[in-house]
Image (tube, helix red, strand yellow):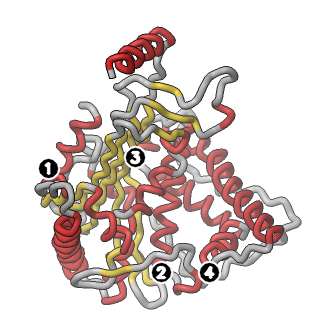
Amino acid sequence: MGPKESVAKVVQQPNLGLCGVQPMCNRSDQELEFKVLRLPRCGQCSAPELDPAVETELTFAEKATGSSPSNVGQRNVQAAKAIIRSIFGDLERHCEEEQKHYQSTGAQPSRQKCNTWATYTNKARLQRFASDSLAFVQSNADCRTRLLSPKQLRFLILLQHLVSEDCSDVNRPEPLRKHQDSYEGVLTSSVNSQLVKDAHRSEFSVDGQSFSMQDLPACAEGMEEERRSTIAKFQSEFVTALETYLLGFCKRNGLSVGGTRRLVQVVTTQMSQAGLANLDRGSQASRYVVGSQGLDQRTAYNLSTMTLASGAELLKLSILCMKTGFSQYLEKDASLKVSGVEYPKRCKPESYIYQYATLSFTVGPQVDDCESIVCSVLDAIDEAQLSPLSPQDEEEIIIEERELDCVT
């Protein structure tokens, strides 16, 4: 099944992953994943600062497994250690360089940026992040059952860290948050404003009910006011249905008012541009910029619930972003550029960029006298199939373009 077919299929069948097939992990695998407890940190983390002059390498506690070192899961764990060190080393260096740049220019950083610097330049916090990341690799079904490439491991590990930090941010007092999200809603005031603003640009499925502007009649040219009214109505109907569904989940699971607020904020944040940004960071797709001519970009979100054999209920969110139809692309990384090759490159019509992930949301332990929300990555796919045109193909296109110019 191709990427395009899978989007339509998954919107209609919420039990499928956004790849259009049953999730790779079975129920017993998922249950094991959900038993791994990652205690969320509140914003008042008391992790001590280490002496910045001391070079400290992130370390990992050895876990006795009784398995052979050649076991697929153990091989992934061993490979993940170097990747985890690389991820958090990069984040630390980026924050240090950014700090120095602000200091040298006299620019005033935002409070949120200062909080980000404080997070990733604190050795004790980096050690905790590293330990949590390794625990994720040890519990994730994909990591236990099939050998993953370094790129796949990096994508999974970084995605898990980013969604976990988004959840933790909601648990923190506002002055200590790393993001400046605002919230609104119809039944609540906890829906991420970015989701409301961009709702008409994506496709959604909430418990099998579809919401898409593609299903609504298009407004004729010059009817901007009518279009704005149509979009506002769509936003209101979608947000109301989403809030009703999430509030029902919270009521069934006995969440407090504060826990309900946190859950709605966390889920709707991952259904907004923030979720797509998390998906993009660390992915192969982030290496490329594709041309807008002919571009067909589709984003889809599928929200449903799942009940484990233990009777526990959780929320499951699948996110997909797919780009097709483009004919040109640029490689961001200068190291990928080949001397003598002109940019942008032309590519074949079958080229595409395809990303998806399935996240779960469960109720975690109390943080500041209120339930926390824990988000886990169940599975993810990151594909960038870009087929450059051969010199012969390029020549044929140039001839066709010249012929069209002569006709016009």
Residue under numbered circle 2: 171
Alpha-carbon span between mark 4 and mark 2: 11 Å
Question: What amino acid type is highlighted by mark number 1?
Answer: Gln
Task: Using the image, determine if residue 361 lies above or below residue 145.
Answer: below
Residue furthest to the top in view is 392
Residue under numbered circle 3: 380
> 187 or 391, which is in the foreground?
391
Task: Using the image, determine if residue 97 lies above or below residue 398.
Answer: below
Q: Earlier in the sequence, mark 3 or mark 1?
A: 1
Mark 3 is surrounded, within 10 Å at the Cα level, by few (under 14), some (14 to 19) or many (20 or more) other residues, namely many
Name the residue at 14% across, 50% down.
12
Left or right of residue 69, residue 109 in this image: right
Instruction: Classify the position of the N terminus by image quarter.
Output: top left
Name the residue at 41% across, 61% down.
273
Left or right of residue 216, residue 113 in this image: right
Residue under numbered circle 4: 45
Alpha-carbon span between mark 2 and mark 1: 34 Å
Alpha-carbon span between mark 3 and mark 1: 20 Å
> 357 or 138, which is in the foreground?
357
Between disc 3 and disc 4, the foreground one is 3
Residue under numbered circle 1: 12
Q: Which mark is residue 302?
A: none
Alpha-carbon span between mark 4 and mark 1: 43 Å
Q: Are marks 2 and 1 in contact (CB under 8 Å)?
A: no
